[in-house]
Amino acid sequence: MKRRAFVTLAAASLLAGCFGVTPYSDVGPGNLTVRFKAADSNLWTQRGAVLDIWTGPSGPNMEYLGTRDIPASGTVLGLPTGRPLHLVLVFEEGSFLGNHSQGTSIQLPMEALSSSERWLLTISNTRAGFSYDLTRQR
């Protein structure tokens, strides 16, 4: 079942990419802080990350809310409360000389958030690879 949900989400992400990306507008309180632990880019290689936000029960009826670029300085997002969420973290890397780009995506399903919950997503995208850590703040 998880594989089906992943395939459905991947297909929906591809379709969203084909028809353009909708910028994510905050829907709730600033309840997700995203930090870049390390983002090393240079003149020849650019590394970054974007976050796709989906809502609703897993499956083909999920609603795409938008995409937010994650700046090196980090950002705070206002995620909707009271309904399940599916965050898709996409690590991107592009090469100037080779005109080559690649991406790796991670699906982060979340239960419905309450208005008092706060989360911290720490991400790293370096030459050594990428990593992430999603923790609930107490």
Image (tube, rainbow, N blue to C red):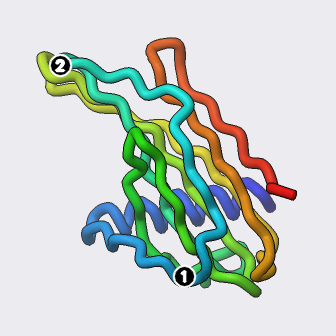
Residue 138 falls in image quadrant: bottom right
Q: How many labels does the image show?
A: 2
How crowded pointer 1 is (Cα within 10 Å; few <14, some 14-19, many 20+) is rated as some
Give the Cα distance between marks 2 and 1. 37 Å
Judge from the rendering whether residue 43 lies leftward or rightward of residue 26; answer left or right. left
Residue position marked by numbered label 1 in the rendering: 63
Judge from the rendering whether residue 113 lies leftward or rightward of residue 40; answer left or right. right
Which residue in the rendered view is the most extreme toward the top?
A: 128
Q: Which is in the foreground here, disc 2 or disc 1?
A: 2
Residue 34 location (% of width, % of height): 56, 50
Residue 7 location (% of width, % of height): 60, 58
Residue position marked by numbered label 2 in the rendering: 43
How crowded pointer 2 is (Cα within 10 Å; few <14, some 14-19, many 20+) is rated as few
Q: Residue 55 carries which label?
A: none
Name the one closer to the observer, 27 or 11. Answer: 27
Mark 1 falls on what kind of element? strand
State whether residue 138 is above or below residue 78. Answer: above
Q: Which residue is drawn at 57% across and 63% down?
A: 9
Q: Residue at x 45, y 62 (%)?
A: 13
Judge from the rendering whether residue 55 lies leftward or rightward of residue 77; answer left or right. right
Mark 2 falls on what kind of element? loop
Query: For the residue marked with disc 2, what is the amino acid?
Result: Leu
Position of the N terminus by quadrant: bottom right
Q: Mark 2 or mark 1: name the one nearer the start of the chain.
A: 2
Q: Residue at x 42, y 78 (%)?
A: 25
Residue 58 location (% of width, % of height): 71, 73
Query: For the residue marked with disc 1, what is the amino acid?
Result: Glu
Q: Residue at x 80, y 77 (%)?
A: 116
Name the one closer to the observer, 6 or 27. Answer: 27
State whether residue 11 is above or below residue 47. Answer: below
